[in-house]
Every structure is written in C-alpha cells, then in structure tokens.
Image (cartoon, rainbow, N blue to C red):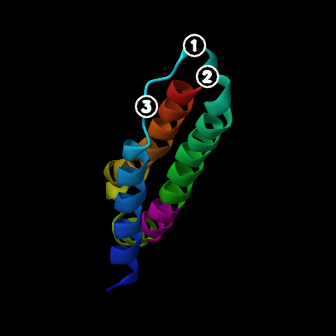
Amino acid sequence: MTKYNKIVLASLVLALATTGLAQTEAAGNDEMYRGLRALGAGLALGLGAVGTGIAQARIGSSLVGAVAEDPSKAGSLLLYFLIPETLVIFGFLALFILN
C-alpha cells in the first residue's frame, strides 16, 4: 500500500467515524463543541493553504520553463498558476461556516 493510499484510507476512516458521533445539539450543549469547531476551521484553512503551496510550487516551476521557451504564452499559462488558489478560498469558506 502506497503512502497516498494510506492517507486516503485514514481520511475516510476519520470522516466516517465523525459521522457516527454526530448528534443533535441541545440549547446548552453548544459551548462544549466550540473548541472542536475552531479546530476544524483551523484545519480547513491550514490544510487548504498547504495544498495550495504544494500545487503552486510544482506548477510554478513548469510555468517558468514554458515561458522561457515561448514568452507569448505567459498570460494564458498564468491562469494555471492561479487555479490552486481556490483551495484557500474554500478553506476560508469553511472557516466562516464553522464559526
């Protein structure tokens, strides 16, 4: 089993385990889960930013090589560099939804 398969498997196990623990909240039970919501919001934003950094590092090096060969393609190739930024935007969205 490869490293990535283990990561995906662990993510699925954690996701399914949390759905099993889900329950309806009573009016006074909201304070108990405030820390877990903050932790989830921080993880959503942080992991989204790490993923964006990894993706842009690989795309950026390829972009520089392609623009060095043909500078007229710089504008269209810049779009591919900006696409991973949506991960951070989704992380911000999850941050505001959870808080």
Amino acid at circle 2: Asp
Mark 2 and mark 3 lie on one chain; the one further toward the N terminus is 3
Residue type, mark 1 in image: Ala
Q: Residue at x 42, y 37 (%)?
A: 22
Magenta residue span: 54-61
Query: Could you say whether the residue bearing mark 2 is in a helix, strand or loop?
Result: loop
Q: Is residue 59 within the magenta segment?
A: yes
Query: 61 or 93, which is in the foreground?
Result: 93
What residue sits right under mark 2 in the picture?
30
Horizontal side of 35 relative to 19 (left or right) equals: right
Q: Would you say the residues marked 1 and 2 are in contact, meaning their CB atoms lie under 8 Å apart?
A: yes
Task: Decide which of 36, 90 is in the foreground and name it.
Answer: 36
Residue assigned mark 3 = 23
Residue sitting farthest toward the top: 27
Q: Residue at 35% across / 52% down in the picture?
A: 16
Q: Residue at x 55, y 26 (%)?
A: 96
Q: Which residue is mark 1?
A: 27
What is the distance, in whole Å, between disc 1 and disc 3 at their CAs?
13 Å
Q: Which of the pair 2/33 is nearer the observer?
A: 33
Residue 17's x, y, as percent?
40, 53
